[in-house]
Amino acid sequence: MKLVETCLGILGSTALRIDGEWTEDWGRPREHALLAALLIRPNEFVPVSHLVPWVWFDDEPMPQSPAAALSTYVTRIRRSLAQVDPNLDIRGGNKAYRIEAAKERIDYHHFRALVAEARALGRSGDAQQAADRCEQARALWRGTPLADVASERAHAWRRSVLHNEWLPANILQVETWLHIGNYDQAIALIDEFQNNYPQEIRLTALLLSALHKLGRGTEASALFVAARRKLLDDDDVDGEQYLRRHHDTLIATSTSASTSARTRAHSMPEAAPRQLPPRQTGFVGRTHQLSELDSDLDSAIAATDSESLSGVVIVDGMPGVGKTALVVHWGHRVAHLFPNGTLYATLDGYSDRDPMDPSIVVDDFLIALDHPPHADTSPRHRQMLLSKLLSGRRTLVVLDNARNSEHIRPLVSLLPDSFIVVTSRQQLTHLKTTTGARRVRVKPLGPHETRTLLIHHLGATALDDEHTHHAIELCQGVPLVIHLLAEHLAHHPPETRATIIDQLDRRQLITDVGETGDGTTTAAALFRQSFLALQPSERRLLRLLPLCPGPDFTTDTACACDGRARQDTARSLTILVGAHLLEPPDAAHRYRLHDLLAEFAADRLATDETEIERRHAEQRILTHYLHTALRAAQLLYPSVAAAPPLTTAVDVEPVRIDTREQAKDWFDHERICLAAAIAMATEHHHHAISWRLADPAATYFDRCGYHHDSRTARQHAVTAARADGHRLAEVSSLVGLGLGYLTEADHHQAHHCLTTALHLLEQESNALGQAVTLQHLARLEALQGHHDEALRIFRHCLDFAQQSNALEVQAWATCHIGQTLCALDQHDTALEHFHRAEWLARQVDDQPARASSLAGLGAVLRNRGDHAGAATYCNQALTIAQAVPDLGVTAEIHLELATIAIADRRTHDAINHAHRAVELCEQTNNIATEAPARNTLATALHTDGQPTQATTQWQHAANLYTRAGNTHLADRARDKARACLHGANKLPTARSTEITPARDRDPVITRHRRGST
């Protein structure tokens, strides 16, 4: 095996491999701690709440915003990682971060993989290769893990790794060396570790073995006597018994072996039974599950002090996921550890036949053991005979496809001295509880493993990459379905296979593929066996669940779908999870149907439910989302007027939400489902719900920067409002849609939506709606650099807002007038407007408007040279915007803080704030703010002596300004890029008032308010 070179290290100080050399001289201590915490769990999101204890001690003061501090550290770490490999990155989202890096590039995970491979090689009898893997694994260690991270979380992790991974790896190294005869090396390593682990009795036992192998029996005896005496003095009775048994075994190996052989000859057949089915060719993946099974077997071996080997392992998973294939493959791998044979029985727990009676299995096992039962022998006598024959023996028993715990209980009780592996579509919780069984869950294969299995069946050139990818998407990692599809394609000429894939949908895949006339082997038939085993209430719930919009759902949504009492629905969900027809709830208490099972359930819905019941279920679900979204939006955005109430006979219970934090969490977790619910409502003609639900959802989408979701929701709302005949809802949705286009710099579509809405409002003489619409049209002018025209329209907007006594619209309009006056260098007048806007925002508790106004005050003070005062206002604004949160306003404030820092010659802070502004804009597709953010970042980088990076940012800014239609600012950015490209000395250092002129800045994006129109 070629040793993969790692580039990210925590087996020592947190280090990076740059140009082939490890370096610990990068970043600051907290950055080391943060990177270490992410490297332990690569490619998965680690919550901020988990990261904070890694970075800060319990007794030291925390920053005001740990999340913001972590964001800054992430930005710095990214720059360090770029020196190692540009493909390494850290992603953020939903209050969590993850590092995207292959595990083999991290020394800790590479070490674990090598050790696991060494154990597998040892079990297969290849001791030399196992020893080599151990040496490669040990060579990755550079000292004490995380030596540079001193938090208590790091201490706890370090203690665990040293005791549970480093020590066992070295013990495994000793065992492999003993097996291949490297006794002196083994003794040297044991001596080294006994100094650090004097209480580890396994090291003493291995040293006894090494000494005996070398013929140094006298030394071994002296060592045993001394070690045994110390154990007795320490009252370690278990340790003394273990060491004594090991010593006795070494002394009497030959005698013990011959005695054991003579004993077995009297009670066992001459040839041990080997009943496992043949291995499946092309077995792929399952590394984790195989490792779990190996670990369970290791634990059973370590716990036994006799010839027998006992234990129970339950292997469960959804239908067709490959449980039997896994167990058979593993059984063949470890068969040499069961000299008395392997027994196998198919119990038909889920099949077209009746479940196998345990008494038949008993008879089959007796026949396999050369003790066929006589006709006059009672069932109890046969059971006792089977138990006697397997008593004190090392036998593997595989009981495949058990129906439930009661089905398997009689057999398990007969085999107390056997190692039993049970497969089932049920979790067999009762069996696990009563026997202490270990559980191994089999999940669908990943995309790479699915591709490998598909290619094995079809051949590498059977499909091109595009159609192979589509086939992988269809099969969703279920081996049985992969096999059926491959068989289906194999029976067609190669030139037609791509066409078959193009025409195949998931419903056809599960219902038609596999229907050959020689018995039904479709996936739907397999799923139906589990479906029919359910009670009627669970069957009904399963077929209704595909109506839940989005990829997952909560118990609350399931209750709305089901229409029963919460406790009844919750119980049915638990039953479906136990039957592996529903994924277990995740940390956020959300359930998910596997895509193929969802397709099967939808097929049953179309077959078993009436159109009336389906529509009632849709109404319950959508009404549940509507009521909850309205409640959450009322708490988060109290100044935004709600849509007119919906009169409906549907009685559903919304989620109970009492605080702003709960409202934000609900929106965060339901975002994708909300978008799907709005689309579902429109497509299924629930128009009155669709536009009402789109309103609070799009408000949240806007504030958090999900502009694509907002735009799509508004498009559905426009369609639904027109179909519903609600003119005001149509206008409001058009205004919101226009704002979405404005944010994404699609000015043509924005202008069309806003002018259409304004025309409708003028017909209705709706002053408030005209105020809101004019505000966004003025914003459009400002983005294109037409500040005089923008100011005129903003003032017209303010007149309408004052006529309507709409304080919230007045607050935003006044704030925008202040920003536009800044762009026109009328700072004294702008200051008055910002003060007025901040006061109005406080009256209506509009926190984003207040934050924007405070940021405007900071901009005016910066222009006057009062950098400290400007920073004070902007930091106050940042705290408010982050608490809402409003990512658009937050990006603007970071941009202003960057400009202040440049003027104050704090270049490092300026780069950090500008980077954060760019990140937020990229995250939210906020092109209007991204252009000036990149312009400011370029200025900061140039000031910091980084002309290449500055040139790149100015070029980005120029492209974005062009896209936004502001040719003046685009030309200025290109001029700076060209000057910087031809030599940093040709670009003059800007004065503090010239670094980011007010006219180069874009006003804060106005957030659309539903009630405004």
Image: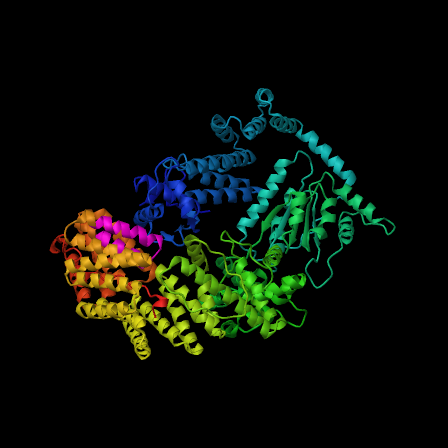
**Can the viewer see residue 534?**
yes
In this picture, residue 89 sits left or right of residue 304: left
- Residue extending farthest to the right is 376
Q: How is the image coloured?
A: rainbow
State the predominant SS element of the stretch in magenta: helix
Residue 891 covered by magenta stretch: yes
Left or right: where 509 falls relative to 85: right
Q: Is residue 326 above or below residue 740?
A: above
932 left or right of 453 in image: left
Picture quadrant where residue 715 is located: bottom left
State the residue in front, 231 or 485.
Answer: 231
**Image label count:** 0
Q: Position of residue 779 (x, y in %)?
A: 25, 67
Near-viewer residue (719 or 915): 719
The reply to whether the magenta stretch includes residue 64 is: no
* The C terminus sits in image quarter: bottom left
x and y percentages locating residue 429 in the rendered image: 64, 49
Q: Position of residue 72 (x, y in %)?
A: 31, 48
Residue 2 drawn at (x, y percent): 44, 47
Q: Quadrant of residue 457?
A: bottom right
User: What segment carries the magenta color?
Assistant: 870-898
Q: Is residue 918 something one can see in this rendering?
A: no
